[in-house]
Amino acid sequence: MISFSHSIALVGLSSLVAITPSTSPAGSPTVVPIAAIPIIREAPTNLQGALADDFVVSQQTPYSTGRNEILSISPSTGTRQLYEVSLPDTGTFQLYETHFSNVSVREPSKVVDESQSLGDEQIETSLSQFSIRYDNNQPAIAYLADGASATFESGQVVVRSPSGQVIETLSSQSSTPLTHNQSIANQASKSLQLAQANTDSCQQTIRTQFYHVSVAVSSGAKTLKQAQSDYGKVFNWILTFSAKALENSTVPNSRNITFQSVACQPPVLCNEPQTYAGANEIRTDLFRLPQGRNPLVTLQYEFYEIPDRIELYYNGEMIFSVGPASGYDITQIASLPDNTNYVGVKVIGNTDSGTLWNYTILCDSQL
């Protein structure tokens, strides 16, 4: 029986996804450049200033299913934006779901114009929380908090009530059908190699993928501009919001953060102590554990005199937290399931500009 002792390190925002490379006739990987992404388009539907530009990555939560939740929060509005994507080593980049909550719209009733069957409170609730699920990086179904849905089906968008009853079916008027968008996205996925050593190539690929997903979501929103029902009009708004959010996430925001800068940072291996200095800053990362049975996680940290906080996440749960705390400590975290690949780590710095911290996460397992 062999025992391994390692440590995981934090180097900023991370979660690299590898896309299957194409090969030349000789068998060597080929990296094909992508054309520049078009300029961000203005949203055709009035979003009433609901979409902020100051989202900060707050947390990464890896799952045993091979998925990773990347949560961003807007400090100015409190809106929460959660993207569920593939973990590193899964072969190709996949966007599985986007979820938005705490969305605030100044005049919800204007979303459905004058005639409305939904009450103002119901409209406001519907706009405040919604999600979209994706299939092969293409929108498949959008949900409201009350269970109403809009399904993308063969060039149509089918709007259903919370009980599942079909309210209306709308045919796409787009000259670029979803299947064409999907073909473009798939080709980009196949033609570009996401090498960890080539961050620029990785970021360009992720940005291209997000752009094409956004185009497909925008196509659905355009179709829903024809909607006669209140639910159809609400879905038009939330799809427009979601498409714009996808686009915005790839452009440096007011805090100079992009989604691809998170998604293309290589996973950090064990045994790399980290040191940071800074006030009121959140550091989040994915950490790769050594393969084997009975993985153990031991946290060793030094927060010096000014208290800071650290949290560990796995499979949708916070598995450990300490702080705000000062000084040095070393503590063992509860055992994780066999063959756990990643743990999400979050450090929340003190608002004091003089705060300093360093830590190492020790990972033990047996083969």
Image (spheres, helix red, strand yellow):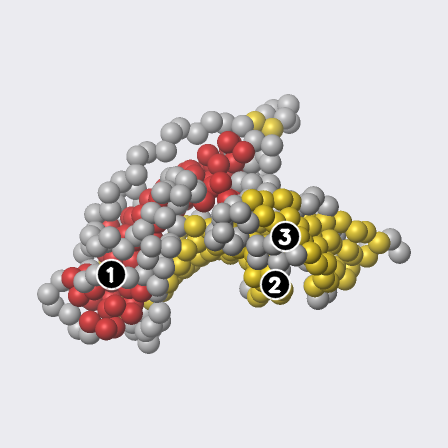
Identified at 25% across, 68% down, the residue is 124
The picture places residue 250, in percent across and down from the top left corner, at: 40, 41
Snapshot quadrant of residue 50:
bottom left
Where does label 1 land, which residue? 105
Horizontal side of 83 relative to 243 (left or right) equals right
Identified at 47% across, 27% down, the residue is 33
Label placed on residue 322: 2
The picture places residue 331, in percent across and down from the top left corner, at: 72, 62
Q: In the rendered view, would you say 84 is above or below 24?
A: below
Cα–Cα span, label 1 and label 2? 36 Å
- At mark 1, the secondary structure is loop
User: Of the residues under marks 1 and 2, which one precedes in the sequence?
Assistant: 1
**1 vs 2, front mark:** 2
Cα–Cα span, label 3 and label 2? 14 Å
Amino acid type, mark 3: Tyr
User: Residue 342 versus residue 182: which sits nearer the camera?
Assistant: 342
- At mark 2, the secondary structure is strand
The picture places residue 308, in percent across and down from the top left corner, at: 56, 56
The picture places residue 173, in percent across and down from the top left corner, at: 23, 48
Q: Name the residue at the bottom extreme.
A: 163
- At mark 3, the secondary structure is loop
Image quadrant where one finds the N terminus: bottom right
